[in-house]
Image: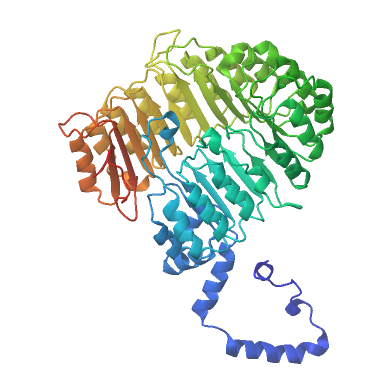
Amino acid sequence: MLENCGGDNGDDERWSLHPDEASQTKFRQVSSIVCMPPPDQVLENVLEIVLCFLTSHRDRNAASLVCKSWFRAEAQTRQEVFIGNCYAVSPARAIDRFRGVRSLVLKGKPRFADFNLVPLGWGARFSPWVAGMSPAYPWLERICLKRMTVSDADLVLLARSFTSFRDLSLLSCDGFTTAGLAAVAENCRRLRSLDLIENDVEDDEDEVVDWVSRFPPGKTCLESLVFDCVGFAVNFGALEALVARSPRLWRLRVNDYISVGRLCRLMSLAPQLTHLGTGSFSTFEGEGDFRAILESAFMASKSLVCLSGFRNLAIDYLPIIYPACANLISLNLSYAQITADMLGPVITRCHNLQTFWVLDSVRDEGLQMVAATCKNLRELRVFPLDPTEDSEGSVSDIGLQAISEGCKHLESILYFCQSMTNAAVVAMSNNCRDLLVFRLCIMGRHRPDHLTGEPMDEGFGAIVQNCKKLTRLAVSGLLTDNAFSHIGKYGKSVRTLSVAFAGNSDLGLRYVLEGCPKLQKLEIRDSPFGDAGLLSGIHHYYNMRFLWMSSCKITLKGCKEVARRLPHMVVEVIRDRPEDDSGSFMEKVYMYRSLVGPRNDAPPFVKLL
């Protein structure tokens, strides 16, 4: 195995000698001993080969900490780099350490940027990274960016610098327009995937560039094309031609400017698709009725396993997907406002479903249908149709308990609701012991168990106590310090904890920071934790990726004390209004470890301590 990894063809003469060659072989062995490199070099060469088999970034990080020689060998062999915070290390330092990188995953803004809690212009620009990488990594093949600000100039530089570039994924990014996409399409001639997911594409309507037509003519290497977040019409003729000359295309997710009539034509050109995002699942004015043609297209698409889209859904077209349901392992209806009656005929055909996203408009009755049918479900996300705090709840403890009883292999759940009971959460902890992710978002503030009036302590305590594999937890509702005591006592594998509108004293935060040894990411909003709770985690912050606290009771004095005692932690105080050092509570505090100290691109509303 080692010889093959190093390029050997496997015909090792040591194991296939002809008797007449024995004397010659012995001479060669003696000669090789004389010419052998020093023992330390031999060990380092072997180590580099062994490290090729480590693919997890956590395993590689652990290997690099063994000793200096392992540190060097790991850096020399690493081809994939994951950076969870773009300000934790500088581009120059990363490039100096890792010289052979072919793939980069880079994350920017805190996750609460998804809820508009991070002001515009905060930072996380991709510009310094692409400027540093363009001369250092000419062989770079893949970049995945999340919550980064990416300019058109960045995309132009990327497209012109990396001649072997294959894969670009932009998730929740902003700052670029269709002109940047056109540069990527035109210059990355080996492009294998272009995935644009939940980005803000910032064109003015009169400046939109026809980026789809910029792909080179002839057969392409394209395997994945996702542009459902692009809010502008595309040149459909160019898209149709692109799909036709992309025989390897297995994933296509289009935006809501693609009607079912056009979807039929795309599906007929790419019967090999396994993942399809349907765009606007309705007809445009004057197009006619495409139900029969679309049904034939779905019947012919035997390889489909993942369906999403269904924006602007025309209910009459929903039965058309019935023929594909039996093979589906993933179904995303989170853009379709459907009822339980509409969902029933679809979900009862999806016996193999493993991932399901849906709006709470299906109500508890719809979730009961899911529980009765999808026995192999691994991931469920239930999003709110109306995300306001005072909205009328459509799903409740009844739906959650049904899922726990019917989908016992569940590993991940995100559940938005207005009311919940401890009994339902305890039932889930008992029935779904393999949970890795449990995110329960009770949208009203400080909501207790709606049947007993008790805090939700018992339910969340049962989750961390019974679900031993749990790595991500989001808590909400009326919670006392007792709930956080349970999290600290039993949540030994929790890496990410999100807290909203919960807790009643600093003791709760202390329980978590002192009791969860693997905690990496802690997000807290609208909770009563203050300086005493903040300072209780001094011993642990260097082991964490970040801490975010907004609308809590943290003072500038407390933030300065953390910065004084932990010089390698960057403490950012973020203000929505002009600076006020009067001792009032800080609006937003973002803390993270950094190898290079405070950043040099902070805007005026960010104070670095």
The answer to whether residue 4 is above or below residue 174 is below
Foreground: 510 or 341?
Answer: 341
Work out whether 577 lies above or below 183: above
Along the viewing direction, whichever of 259 and 249 lies nearer the viewer: 259
Residue found at the very far left of the displayed protein: 582
Front residue (pair 329, 118): 118
Vertical placement of residue 357 versus 33, above or below: above
Q: Judge from the rendering whether residue 178 lies leftward or rightward of residue 602; answer left or right.
A: right
Classify the position of the N terminus by image quarter.
bottom right
Residue, far top: 451
Whether residue 271 can be seen here: no
Residue at 45% across / 60% down in the picture? 132
Pinpoint residue 169: horizontal percent, then vertical percent. 57, 45
Q: Residue furthest front?
A: 206
Specify whether 46 is left or right of 499.
Answer: right
Quarter-of-image position of residue 606: top left
How many marks can you see? 0
Residue 377: which quarter of the image? top right
Image quadrant in which the C terminus is located? top left
Q: Residue at x 47, y 66 (%)?
A: 70
Question: Where residue 87 appears, x then y in whole percent?
Answer: 38, 49
Camera sees residue 111: yes
Q: Position of residue 588 (x, y in %)?
A: 30, 33
Q: Position of residue 418 (x, y in %)?
A: 47, 14
The answer to whether 105 is drawn above or below residue 384 in the figure is below
Identity of the residue drawn at 63% across and 49% down = 185
